[in-house]
Image (tube, grey):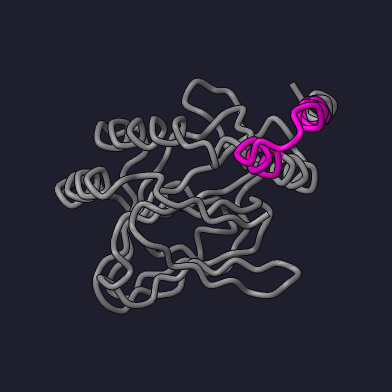
């Protein structure tokens, strides 16, 4: 499932985070620091040093916003979220075709399975040229360049790339989610069912039927949850 999640951050939050990123100075490092052996040769960007004070502070702000966003919770069914990272592209920087690694190592030594990838856009698309996130699936290539504060959620096994930024600077946060439900097809069924239930609730449809659907949703979730 490829899903746009609007307004994860409001304009004031975006402005505050972007200002902090612009002021981060020496905390910016070569983006290949966190790339795997297949991604490193095609990764040409800058990244806020993982574990640095700015990365931790800004990452906590993103996580707090995600916890309050019902569409993200409904779609991702998050079990654990990798601490958000931040990247910067300018002057022709790009990240060629790659697939994200299946497992990420957390700072405490635990491992996180990457079921979903997320990119949260942190600047106005009119402020830079290029920089589209291109995600390929069985329906072709999807070129994504969202408004500041909007996020795209997609299966981590997807082949994807970031096109060269030829003008301005592209700022974004990126991270991975280990879902309670591992299979993308199952998560999609649950997401569509949850969205339908919410619409039925809003229309005050038959209460008994709604209660039955809610029961079916939770029984499926109970069946498919891995933990």
- Image location of residue 154, percent across then percent down: 61, 53
* Range shown magenta: 194-218
168 vs 196, nearest the viewer = 196
Of the 4 image quadrants, the one containing the N terminus is: bottom right
60 vs 104, nearest the viewer = 60
Residue at 49% x, 20% y is: 108
Residue at 54% x, 23% y is: 109
- The secondary structure making up most of the magenta span is helix
Magenta-span inclusion, residue 204? yes
Report the side of 171 relative to 224 (left or right). Answer: left
Residue 73 seen in this snapshot:
yes
Which quadrant would residue 180 be assigned to in this image? Answer: top right
Residue at 57% x, 48% y is: 117
- Image location of residue 95, percent across then percent down: 47, 66
Magenta-span inclusion, residue 78? no
Q: Is residue 100 above or below residue 142?
A: above
Of the 4 image quadrants, the one containing the C terminus is: top right
- Image location of residue 93, percent across then percent down: 36, 70
Residue at 29% x, 64% y is: 124
């Amino acid at each position: 499932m490829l899903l746009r999640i609007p307004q994860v951050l409001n304009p004031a939050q975006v402005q505050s985070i972007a200002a902090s990123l612009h002021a981060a100075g020496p905390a910016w490092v070569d983006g290949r620091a966190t790339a795997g052996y297949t991604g490193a040769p095609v990764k040409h960007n800058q990244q806020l040093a993982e574990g640095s004070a700015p990365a931790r502070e800004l990452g906590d702000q993103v996580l707090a916003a995600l916890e309050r966003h019902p569409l993200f919770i409904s779609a991702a069914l998050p079990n654990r979220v990798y601490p958000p990272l931040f990247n910067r592209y300018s002057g022709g920087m790009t990240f060629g075709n790659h697939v994200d690694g299946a497992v990420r190592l957390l700072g405490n030594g635990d491992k996180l399975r990457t079921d979903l990838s997320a990119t949260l856009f942190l600047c106005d698309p009119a402020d830079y040229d290029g920089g589209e996130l291109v995600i390929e699936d069985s329906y072709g290539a999807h070129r994504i360049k969202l408004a500041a504060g909007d996020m795209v959620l997609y299966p981590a096994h997807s082949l994807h790339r970031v096109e060269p930024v030829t003008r301005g600077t592209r700022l974004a946060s990126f991270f991975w989610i280990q879902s309670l439900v591992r299979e993308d097809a199952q998560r999609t069924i649950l997401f569509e069912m949850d969205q339908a239930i919410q619409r039925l609730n809003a229309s005050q449809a038959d209460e008994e039927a709604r209660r039955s659907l809610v029961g079916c949703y939770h029984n499926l979730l109970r069946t498919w949850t891995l933990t």
